[in-house]
Image (spheres, helix red, strand yellow):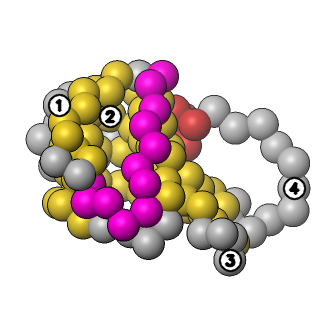
Amino acid sequence: MENNNRTEVLKANDLLRYQDEAVISRTLVKKSTGSITLFAFDKGQGLSEHTAPFDALAHIIDGEAEIVVDGEVFNLMSNEMIIMPANKTHALKALSKFKLLLTMIRS
């Protein structure tokens, strides 16, 4: 799917399956100007605190996650999203199994 020129209808929830005690990812679009990546987190899994040089939109498509941005805690549920500004620390933790569509803007 990465870098193709086809138009197709996708169901984000069906593109990745949860795996026990794991974080799974699948890149849907990867360009010099940004990327779109789908993640599936098992309960209790997460990403430790880090920064990115680009703005990112995190859209929860299933489940519930704790997202910490610059020290502020946000609990997001299915169909909610948050913008994580460039160069601000952020971390994610699965409060339940959750799927995340991450859009990174590089320009």
- What is the distance, in whole Å, between disc 1 and disc 3 at their CAs? 33 Å
The quadrant of the rendering that contains the C terminus is bottom right
x and y, in percent, of residue 56 in the image: 49, 54
Which amino acid type is shown beneath numbered disc 4?
Arg
Whole-number angstrom distance, CA of label 2 to CA of label 1: 8 Å
Residue 90: name its quadrant.
Answer: bottom left
Residue highlighted by disc 1? 95
Q: CA distance from mark 4 to mark 3?
A: 19 Å
Q: Quadrant of residue 32?
A: bottom right
Query: Around disc 2, counting alpha carbons within 10 Å, would you say few (fewer than 14), some (14 to 19), or many (20 or more)?
Result: many
The dot on residue 98 is: 2
Q: Nearer the viewer, mark 1 or mark 3?
A: 3
What residue is shown with label 4? 6
Give the mark, 1 or 3, whose residue is nearer the N terminus.
Answer: 3
Name the residue located 60 percent from the left edge and 61 percent from the top edge. 105
> SS of the residue at dot 1?
loop
